[in-house]
Amino acid sequence: MATLTETAYGELLSQARPRVIKTEAENARATAELEALDTLGRPLTAAEKSLAELLTVLVQQFEDRTSV
C-alpha cells in the first residue's frame, strides 16, 4: 500500500490548486483534472488518489448546489 507523503501531495495541490467550485468553468477544469488522473494508464499514487478524492467532493458539491 502506498503511503501518502505530504511533499508529494503538496506538489499536486500546488499544481491543481483545487478550491470551492463556483462556476461552470471551474467545474469543467476540476472535471478535466479528474479525467486526466483517470487516464494515466497506471495505478494512482496515494497523493493522486487523495487529490482525486478532493476533486470529486468539490465537483459533487457544486453539482448538488446547481442541479434543479
Image (cartoon, rainbow, N blue to C red):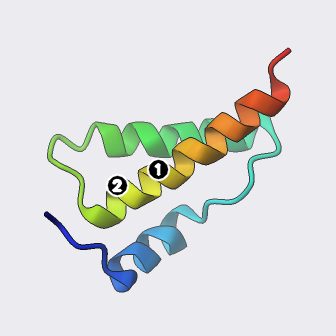
Which residue sits at x=72%, y=29%? 63
Query: What is the quadrant of the N terminus in the image?
Result: bottom left
Dot 1 falls on a residue whose secondary structure is helix
The label shown at residue 40 is none
**Among the 4 quarters of the image, the one containing residue 51:** bottom left
Residue ID for mark 2: 49
Query: What is the quadrant of the C terminus in the image?
Result: top right
Q: Is residue 3 left or right of residue 19?
A: left
| Relative to 28, residue 53 above or below | below
Which residue sits at x=24%, y=53%? 44
Which residue sits at x=52%, y=74%? 14
Residue 37 location (% of width, % of height): 35, 46
Say which amino acid is labelled 2: Lys
| Relative to 21, residue 16 above or below | below
The label shown at residue 53 is 1
Residue sitting at the far front: 1
Q: Residues within 10 Å of mark 1 (few under 14, many from 20)?
A: few
Front in this rendered view, residue 58 or 15: 58
Q: Is residue 59 left or right of residue 2?
A: right
**Among the 4 quarters of the image, the one containing residue 3:** bottom left
| Relative to 52, residue 65 above or below | above
| Relative to 55, residue 32 above or below | above
How many marks the image carries: the answer is 2
Residues tagged 2 and 1 counted as in contact (Cβ below 8 A): yes
Residue 20 location (% of width, % of height): 74, 54
Q: Residues within 10 Å of mark 2 (few under 14, many from 20)?
A: some
Residue 56 location (% of width, % of height): 53, 42
Which residue sits at x=71%, y=44%? 26
**Among the 4 quarters of the image, the one containing residue 2:** bottom left
Residue 54 location (% of width, % of height): 53, 54
Dot 2 falls on a residue whose secondary structure is helix
Say which amino acid is labelled 1: Glu
